[in-house]
């Protein structure tokens, strides 16, 4: 380290005067988007060096900027990630044909990024035409990931399989698509060998198994394979023996009558997969065949059982073989007892998601409760990400949970009955969530539920200084609650609120805030059109989009506010009004 | 960071009366982009994963849904819990899969009262998940398979409802099974073949036969009336009935709405 101050500034000056190619060389090693953003703000020279060396761009809201602007700033992009619709569209709260069509982007990319290799889309509309366009125009295309998208069919996938000669990744997850047939898989050319990732778990049509088997044998670099429900255990065995190098596997249906011989073969196949660290699928898995997994479980770090309705003992037996588990997704059929088994067997657990097997069942004797969550927090001290659907919770339990695991970064608690209080004390869940924000100083994402008053939001505003994403539903209270959040959370980026009594005063209190956020969603709140218009007038750099909320006799609105450099969008459908 | 170009506000502004209320929100430049086909088509996307609109009473609905003659007093009020759109917040794909899982206990009418009492922890949870591995030795109906009979054909078949996520694919499967047409589905994207509804004769009334099902209450219903998820919880077996015999079946609308008012959720 240099002793003298003058030498420090000389050093600094020299660093700032690095020849461009050296600077670019250094910057090309930086991948994180946030780091790159920071770099670009240092100086003009660094801004330029950064933009020339950026290979991947992430656009969190496709309407925040025009594709032409992106292309102008970043000339050398090889991979793009785009997110479109507001997150609540996943839960049917956004009407179809809302927008977020990727085609406009593809058209610009065809011109500016002909060598584009990767495209990752989330909540975008993608048509078959777009997929065909993609396959045709980008000769170097390698990786396609579509999560929670809509608008295309398996026909579009055929175009991708047929024409993308260098395809390494095809990842299709949870999209609302037209699953016409599984023929797309047979469209990969005969001598195709480049695939490394193939995920078609959420498609329901049968694929040609011979084609799949051939594909798997030929693609020696295949690391991630997630098949759909129609693939049987017997077929799975045949695939596994051809791909022992897999690191992530999504099985098909785990329910089939196997002979003893077939069972042994299957077990052997799993034993030969020595690199497996993630396992999913497992539809209809039962005690009968789960044991074939045991040999593969020792090195597992991620186990997704959220499509297998396991009972507590079944889960207990399984996790006993998974000492290195870091992420676990289950259905609440495992109940508290199952979660206790997790707590005893998986000390390295960092992430737990418990989904409800029967979300509309009001019977509180089913599913998981506060004690399951508590048990996990006691046994798994590294826990920092939880998504927990339950039918009952107490403030005391939540407080103890975060005391056990103060490192929470993502705390998403969904008490399934809207507005339900602490079931023991009948009080609001204010103190519980208050404990969360007070104790978990690294909290970045929070999902609140149950009976909540302004006090919850006062706590959040006062303590949650790192909070970036907040989801609120069926809260009570007043404008003050939302004001506290907007005033208090400096890092807030995404705020989504539904069915809560926040009105224009609350909305307008965020006037200074919204341009530093990605977006705000409010639906079935007390905001009126005039409030929105006022906001729009005061802040021209925000798009304030309003949709009439049909459920409530048209009295309330769905409001979506987001910062943008692109002005009001030109593709808004008739039911969306940009103020 | 240049400011956005001055907006043509007039084109985007809603037409409102002076009170500022939402008269006709006659809204902006509604370019229909992509394959959406323009305008909202409630649940009309072919083979699309069912949305809230398709589940009038169970998943939560907009009251505008056609068939839901729902007369709940609070309509959509939070206290009724299960009646709310988009709640609990679970993605449509997962919701669809859960329906398949959860339907098991309700579909098992074969269980005698005795056996119900026998379940292990005093809870009926066990019935939900076990496929074949039932320790009680109870005759477990394999989740998903139901019998299908066609008028005029003595031998019935079985179809796995779990392999389908919508009526269209089910009807296709049954047509393949019973009618054995030549494979006419052109997979290179010929427009008409995308209209799965068109090619599924059993569903659109063009055929000499219609698809019906027997529900838990022993009534024969026309397929397609209720959302897929509800259908799965109710169906006992299927029958491909001659159209001429269909008159005996309860009128769609009335039957459906009656059912919905009776259903606990």
Image (cartoon, coloured by chain):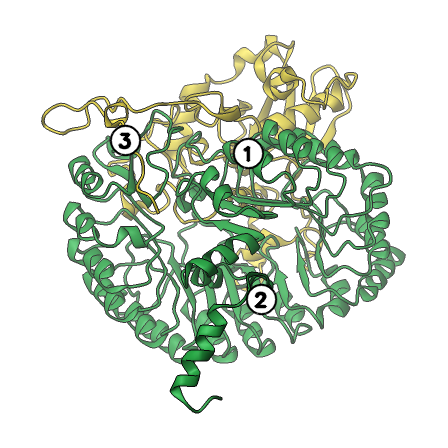
Q: Which of the numbered marks, if any, corresponds to residue A107?
A: none
Q: Is residue A531 left or right of residue B28?
A: left
Shown in yellow, the chain is: B
The answer to whether residue A359 of the structure is visible from this angle is yes
Q: State the SS at label 2.
A: helix
Q: Residues within 10 Å of mark 1 (few under 14, many from 20)?
A: many
Q: Nearer the viewer, mark 2 or mark 3?
A: 2
The percent position of residue B60, horizontal first and vertical second, equals: 38, 39
Q: Nearer the viewer, mark 2 or mark 1?
A: 2
Q: Is residue A292 above or below residue B19?
A: below
Q: Nearer the viewer, residue A453 or B119?
A: A453
Q: Nearer the viewer, residue B118 or B14?
A: B14
Q: Earlier in the sequence, mark 2 or mark 1?
A: 2
Q: Is residue A320 above or below residue A181?
A: below
* Inter-mark Cα distance, 1 to 3: 28 Å
Q: Which residue matches tag 2?
A: A26
Q: Is residue B114 left or right of residue A577?
A: right
Q: Is residue A287 left or right of residue B30?
A: right
Q: Which residue matches tag 1?
A: A126
């Amino acid at each position: 380290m240099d002793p003298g101050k003058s030498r420090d500034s000389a050093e600094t000056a020299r660093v700032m005067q690095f020849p461009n190619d050296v600077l670019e060389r250094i910057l090309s090693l930086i991948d994180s988007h946030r780091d790159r953003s920071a770099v670009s703000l240092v100086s003009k020279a660094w801004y330029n060096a950064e933009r020339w060396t950026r290979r991947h761009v992430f656009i969190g809201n496709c309407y925040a900027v025009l594709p032409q602007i992106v292309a102008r700033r970043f000339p050398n992009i090889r991979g793009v990630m785009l997110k479109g619709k507001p997150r609540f569209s996943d839960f049917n709260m956004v009407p179809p044909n809302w927008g977020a069509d990727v085609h406009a982007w593809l058209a610009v990319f065809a011109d500016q990024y002909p060598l584009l290799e990767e495209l990752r889309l989330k909540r975008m509309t993608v048509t078959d035409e777009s997929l065909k366009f993609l396959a045709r125009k980008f000769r170097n295309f390698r990786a396609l990931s579509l999560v929670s998208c809509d608008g295309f069919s398996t026909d579009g996938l055929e175009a991708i399989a047929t024409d993308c000669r260098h395809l390494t990744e095809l990842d299709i997850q949870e999209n609302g698509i037209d699953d016409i047939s599984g023929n797309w898989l047979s469209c990969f050319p005969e001598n195709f060998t480049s695939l490394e990732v193939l995920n078609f778990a959420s498609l329901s049509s049968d694929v040609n198994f011979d084609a799949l088997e051939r594909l798997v044998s030929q693609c020696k670099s295949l690391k991630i394979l997630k098949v759909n429900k129609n693939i049987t255990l017997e077929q799975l065995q045949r695939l596994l023996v051809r791909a022992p190098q897999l690191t992530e596997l999504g099985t098909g249906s785990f329910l089939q009558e196997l002979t003893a011989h077939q069972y042994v073969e299957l077990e052997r196949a799993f034993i030969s997969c020595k690199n497996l660290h993630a396992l999913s699928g497992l539809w209809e898995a039962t005690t009968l065949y789960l044991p074939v997994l045991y040999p593969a479980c020792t090195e597992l770090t991620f186990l997704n059982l959220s499509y297998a309705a396991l009972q507590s003992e079944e889960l207990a037996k399984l996790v006993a073989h998974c000492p290195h588990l870091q992420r676990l997704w289950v259905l609440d059929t495992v109940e508290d007892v199952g979660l206790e088994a997790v707590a005893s067997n998986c000390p390295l657990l960092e992430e737990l998601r418990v989904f409800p097997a029967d979300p509309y069942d009001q019977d509180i004797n089913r599913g998981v409760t506060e004690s399951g969550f508590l048990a996990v927090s006691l046994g798994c001290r590294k826990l920092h990400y939880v998504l927990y659907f339950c039918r009952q919770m107490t403030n005391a339990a939540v407080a103890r949970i975060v005391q056990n695991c103060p490192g929470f970064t993502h705390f998403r608690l969904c008490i399934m009955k809207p507005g339900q209080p602490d079931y023991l004390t009948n009080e609001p869940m204010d103190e519980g969530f208050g404990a969360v924000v007070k104790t978990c100083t690294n909290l970045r994402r929070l999902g609140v539920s149950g009976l909540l008053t302004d006090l919850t939001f006062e706590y959040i505003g006062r303590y949650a200084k790192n909070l970036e994403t907040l989801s609120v539903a069926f809260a009570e209270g007043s404008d003050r609650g939302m004001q506290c959040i907007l005033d208090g959370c400096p890092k807030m980026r995404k705020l989504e609120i539904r069915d809560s009594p926040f009105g224009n005063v609350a909305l307008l209190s965020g006037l200074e805030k919204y341009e530093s956020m990605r977006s705000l969603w409010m639906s079935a709140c007390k905001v009126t059109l005039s409030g929105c218009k006022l906001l729009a007038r005061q802040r021209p750099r925000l798009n304030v989009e309003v949709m009439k909320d049909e459920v409530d006799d048209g009295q309330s609105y769905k409001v979506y506010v987001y910062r943008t450099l692109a002005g009001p969008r030109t593709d808004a459908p008739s039911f969306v009004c940009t103020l | 960071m240049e400011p956005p170009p001055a907006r043509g506000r007039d084109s985007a502004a809603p037409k409102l009366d002076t009170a500022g209320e939402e008269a006709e929100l006659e809204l902006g430049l509604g370019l229909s982009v992509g394959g959406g086909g323009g305008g909202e088509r409630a649940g009309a996307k072919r083979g699309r994963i069912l949305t809230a609109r398709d589940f009038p009473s169970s998943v939560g609905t907009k009251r505008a849904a056609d068939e839901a003659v729902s007369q709940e007093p609070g309509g959509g009020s939070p206290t009724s819990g299960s009646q709310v759109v988009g709640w609990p917040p679970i993605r449509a794909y997962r919701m669809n899969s859960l329906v398949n899982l959860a339907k098991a206990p309700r579909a098992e009418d074969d269980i005698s009262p005795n056996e119900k009492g026998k379940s292990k922890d005093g809870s009926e949870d066990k019935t939900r998940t076990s496929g074949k591995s039932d320790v009680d030795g109870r005759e477990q109906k394999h989740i998903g398979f139901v019998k299908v009979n066609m008028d005029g054909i003595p031998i019935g078949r079985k179809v796995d409802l779990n392999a389908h996520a919508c009526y269209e694919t089910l009807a296709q499967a049954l047509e393949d099974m019973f009618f054995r047409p030549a494979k006419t589905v052109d997979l290179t994207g010929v427009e008409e073949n995308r209209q799965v509804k068109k090619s599924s004769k059993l569903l659109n009334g063009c055929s000499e036969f219609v698809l019906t099902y027997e529900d838990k209450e022993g009534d024969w219903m026309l397929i397609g009336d209720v959302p897929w998820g509800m259908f799965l919880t109710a169906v006992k077996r299927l029958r491909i009935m001659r159209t001429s015999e269909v008159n005996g079946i309860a009128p769609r609308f009335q039957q459906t709405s009656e059912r919905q008012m009776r259903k606990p959720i």
